[in-house]
Image (cartoon, rainbow, N blue to C red):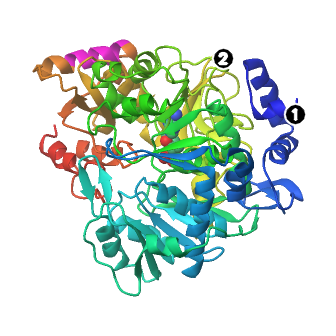
Amino acid sequence: MKMSNYHIKHLEEYYQVYRKSIREPESFWEEVAEEHFIWRKKWDNVLSWDFKKPEVKWFEGAKLNITENCIDRHLATRGDKTAILFEPNNPDEPSEHITYKQLYDRVNQFANVLKAQGVGKGDRVCIYVPMIPELAIAVLACARIGAIHSVVFAGFSATALATRINDSDCKLVVTADGSYRGAKSIDLKGIVDDALEKCPCVKNVLVVKRVNTEISMKAGRDQWLQPLLDEASTNCSPEIMDAEAPLFILYTSGSTGQPKGMVHTTAGYMVYTAYTFKNAFQYRENDVYWCTADIGWITGHSYIVYGPLANGATTVLFEGVPSYPDFGRFWQIVQKHKITQFYTAPTAIRALAKQGVEVVEKYDLSSLKVLGSVGEPINEEAWHWYNDVIGKGKSPIIDSWWQTETGGIMITPIPYVTPTKPTYATLPFIGIQPALMDEQGNELKGNQVEGRLCIKFPWPSIARTIWGNHERYRETYFSAYENNYFTGDGALRDEVGYYRITGRVDDVIIVSGHNLGTAPIEDAINEHPAVAESAIVGFPHDIKGSALYGYVTLKETGESRVHDNLRKEINQLISDKIGPIAKLDKIQFTQGLPKTRSGKIMRRILRKIASKDTSNLGDTSTLLNPEVVQDIIDNAL
Ligand code: WTA
C-alpha cells in the first residue's frame, strides 16, 4: 500500500494508515519522505527525540532545499500552471496568475537581491508586507538562500514590530510603501520607520511599491525593491540546507507580554505540511485552493505557501477583506475563480452569517468541494450556517485543530473520509497521538472523557524551540505533563473517539466548584437569534468563588429589543443547553468584542473589566478594534 499512504480515500484506509503511523512512525514517515520529495542527500536517522530536554530531530543528516520541492521540481510538468493566483483588494483590478515558471524566476531574482544586500544562510530577515505576491515571494526567496524568515503580520503596530525585529536580530526588513484594507490604505512604511528607531540591528530595508504614496526613504538604508529585481538574474542555485536548519521564526503571543518566536525547521515541516495539505483538503491536481488567512499567521505559512506549493497546487492569495466592497466579496471570489477548497476562520463565518443569506445567494458556489475552519472552536450555529448556506450540505467541513507550535493540522476530519459532527474536530491526523490528562497529570483512557489536551509523541512539524529561549519552550510546553507536549487547550473525547476542542484551559471558569468551559456557554448564547457574538469571563463572587459575566453583541437587525427581556431569554437558553449553573450573573450588551488581529477574542481585557480592574489593561495597540474597549469600560455593569 505504499503509494496510497500519500492520499487517503476512505475511512477504513484512514484507520489502517493511522495504525501504521502509530506503530511504526519512523518507517511510516520515512516512506512518505522518500517517495514524495526531492533530497540532495537522504537522512542517516529518521527520528531522535527526548521531550525532557526537549529535543526533536527528524530526518537528521538529510540535505535539501524546500524551494526545490515547492518550485523547481514542478517546472517540468507544471511550468505553465498557476502557482499563485493573486486577487487584489479592489475587485476592478485584474487578478494575477503567477505560473510555476514565473514564480521560479521571481523567487530567484528576489533571492539574488537579498544576497546582494549581504543576507546569507542563517541570517534573519523580517518580512512586513501586506497580502500581495511579494510577500510569498520574499518568504520563498529567504528559504532559497537559507535565510530565516520572520514574517510579522502587516497590521501590527510599530512597537510590536520592533519587539519582534529585535528579539531575533533581523538585519534586513522587507516592507511596502503601504497596504490596502478595503476602502482605506495604511502607511506601512511610516510604521516601519517608527519601529526602526528602536532597531539598531537592521541595516537595510527593501520597499515594494504598492499604493504609490509619497513616503520617506532613508539614504543608505532604504531602497525600492523593483529596480533591484529588474537587474537581478533569474538563476540562483538553492542553498543546500540541513534537515534541522531553521526555516522560519513566527511569533505567537503567550500568557505574558513577550511574544514567543516559535522556530520551525526545514525537512519535517515540509513533509508534514505537504502531507496534511494533500489529505486534509483532499487536494487534486486541478483544484483551485483558497485559504483566507494572512501569511502573517501560521495558517498562511503552512497552507497558503508551503503545503500547497509542495503539492504543485494553485493557491489563492487575497489582499482584501471580507466586507469590501460589500459582504459578498468572498463569495464573488469563489465564483470568479471556481474555488474548490475554501479555508477560513469561525470569526469570519459568524461575521458573514450576520449579513443574511441574500448576499450569498447572488453567487454560484457550486465549485466548492471542501470547507475548512481553523483558529478557534466553531460554534454550532456557525457550523450549520457554513454547512447549509455555503456548502449546501454537500461540502464537508473540516474543523481543523492545530497551533503555531504544531506547524500543521493535528486533529481534523478528512473530507469524504471522516463523517463530520458539528463542533467536533473529530479524529487525530495520521501520526498524531493525542492524550487527555486530568489535573493531577494522569492520562484519561477510554472514551467519554474530558481533560487537557497533550500530544504523546513527536510529529515532523513540531516547533523545535523558542528563538533565544529554550528554557521558556521547555517550561511552557513540556513541564506540565511529563513526557508530553501540552497544548494549553482542553478537549473531550466522545463515545466514538471524536475530539471536541473546548477552548484554552485558561478560559475555564470554576463556578461553585463546577468547571465551566467558556466555549459551550458562548455556543448556547450564540444560538439566540438576536445574538451575533459573545464572550464569557469569570469575575470574583463572594459565594460562588467566580461568577459569569457575559459580553454580548447583537445582530444589526434594525429593530429595537428590550435588553432585560433578552437577558432573560439568554439565561433561559443557557439553562436549557448547559444547566442553571452556567447562567450568567451579568450580561453587558456591547458594540463589539476586543479581538486580536487573528480574530481571537482578548479575554484578558474582558476579564479585567468584569473585575472592575481597568487600571492596567496592558498593551491594547495590537488589537484589531481598540476603540471598542473604552465603550465596554463606559458601559460596564
Ligand atoms: C485554537 C492557529 C478549536 C486553539 C492554527 C489553539 C482551535 C489555538 C481550532 C492556536 C479549532 C485553533 N477548534 N480551537 N479547529 N484551531 N484553535 O497558534 O485554542 O493562532 O491552541 O494557530 O487556536 O492558535 P494559533
The Cα atoms of the two marked residues, 1 and 2, are separated by 28 Å
Is 42 part of what is drawn in magenta? no
Q: Which residues are magenta?
A: 568-576
* Type of amino acid under label 2: Val
Expressed as whole percent of the image width and height from the top left, the position of residue 499 reads: 60, 27
Whether residue 417 is visible here, answered yes or no, is: yes
Whole-percent x, y for residue 223 in the image: 41, 78
Is 329 on the left-hand or right-hand side of 416? Answer: left
Residue under label 2, please give it.
496
Per the rendering, the mark at residue 2 is 1
Q: Which residue lies at the image location 73% right of the left edge and 45% below the top edge?
A: 77
Q: Amino acid at mark 1?
A: Lys
- Give percent across and percent down for residue 139: 55, 61
Residue situated in front as seen by the camera: 528 or 149: 149
Q: Is residue 555 left or right of residue 357?
A: left
Main secondary structure found in the magenta portion: helix
The reply, left or right, for residue 123 in relation to residue 85 is: right
Q: Is residue 572 magenta?
A: yes
Q: Is mark 1 within 8 Å of ligand 1?
A: no
Q: Quadrant of the C terminus?
A: top left
Label 1 element class: loop
Q: Secondary structure at mark 2?
A: loop
Q: In which quadrant of the rendered view does residue 264 lie?
A: bottom right
- First along the sequence among labels 1 and 2: 1
Q: Residues within 10 Å of mark 2 (few under 14, many from 20)?
A: few
Residue at 88% x, 43% y is 27
Marker count (numbered): 2
Q: Is residue 310 above or below residue 349?
A: below
